[in-house]
Image (tube, rainbow, N blue to C red):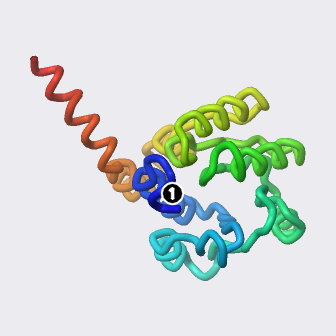
């Protein structure tokens, strides 16, 4: 899948940052992989991040056979948390992410879709997936926006570590930032 997903490196990088941010804030994380023997397991980079979580907040990992991650085992796992919001990211925007988001909305959750951590093989499928989820009621956000929403203030205890994550931007973002800086000097 790595070579087929648009902007895979950026999506992967941001997914890693989201995992690290979940660990900083003690937010439960659920990870699913679609039929690992067909599509491959969760990427090594994410498993490496999950391995750094404290034992008291290790990510729950499930293999799924449906496109939505909300199958019976994940639904049961969700039931132990008293949360009203879910942060959602992954691939593919118009299939697995979309069906998961719609299921979560049907379950009454507020869904925050992190669009710089969501992609598909095709630009149009990604765009249509994100737009349809916005229209269905998902909140559209980015990694950085979510980071500051969770922090609420620079007084939060994990702020220095959070700033390191914010500054650890994907290469694609850095080159865009550099291009903008050069253009502003003209």
Residue farthest left in this picture = 186
Classify 123 as above or below 167.
above
Seen at 48% across and 71% down, the residue is 49
Q: Position of residue 166 (x, y in %)?
A: 38, 48
Q: Is residue 106 left or right of residue 81?
A: right
Q: Is residue 102 left or right of residue 94?
A: right
Q: Is residue 145 left or right of residue 132?
A: left
Q: Position of residue 79 (x, y in %)?
A: 87, 63
Q: Position of residue 78 (x, y in %)?
A: 82, 63
Residue 37, can we see it? yes
Classify 99 as above or below 18.
above
Q: Which residue is mark 1?
A: 15
Residue 118, can we see it? no
Q: Nearer the viewer, residue 124 or 10?
A: 124
Q: How many marks?
A: 1
Residue farthest top in this picture = 186
Q: Nearer the viewer, residue 58 or 132?
A: 132
Seen at 20% across and 36% down, the residue is 178
Classify 73 as above or below 161.
below
Q: Residues within 10 Å of mark 1 (few under 14, many from 20)?
A: many
Classify 183 as above or below 162.
above
Seen at 81% across and 67% down, the residue is 74
Seen at 34% across and 49% down, the residue is 169
Q: Position of residue 50 (x, y in %)?
A: 54, 74
Mark 1 element type: helix
Q: Nearer the viewer, residue 159 or 48?
A: 48
The C terminus lies in which quarter of the figure? Answer: top left
Q: Is residue 128 left or right of residue 185?
A: right
């Amino acid at each position: 899948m790595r070579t087929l997903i648009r902007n895979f490196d950026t999506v992967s990088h941001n997914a890693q940052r989201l995992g690290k941010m979940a660990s900083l804030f003690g937010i439960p994380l659920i990870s699913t992989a679609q039929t690992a023997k067909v599509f491959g397991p969760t990427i090594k980079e994410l498993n490496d991040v999950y391995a750094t979580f404290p034992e008291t907040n290790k990510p729950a990992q499930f293999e799924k056979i449906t496109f939505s991650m909300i199958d019976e085992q994940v639904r049961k796992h969700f039931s132990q948390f008293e949360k009203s919001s879910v942060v959602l990211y992954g691939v593919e925007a118009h299939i697995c992410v979309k069906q998961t988001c719609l299921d979560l909305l049907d379950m009454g959750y507020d869904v925050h879709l992190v669009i710089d951590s969501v992609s598909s093989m095709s630009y149009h499928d990604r765009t249509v997936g994100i737009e349809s989820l916005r229209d269905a009621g998902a909140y559209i956000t980015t990694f950085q926006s979510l980071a500051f929403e969770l922090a609420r203030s620079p007084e939060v205890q994990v702020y220095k570590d959070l700033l390191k994550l914010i500054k650890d931007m994907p290469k694609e973002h850095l080159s865009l930032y550099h291009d903008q800086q050069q253009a502003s000097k003209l």
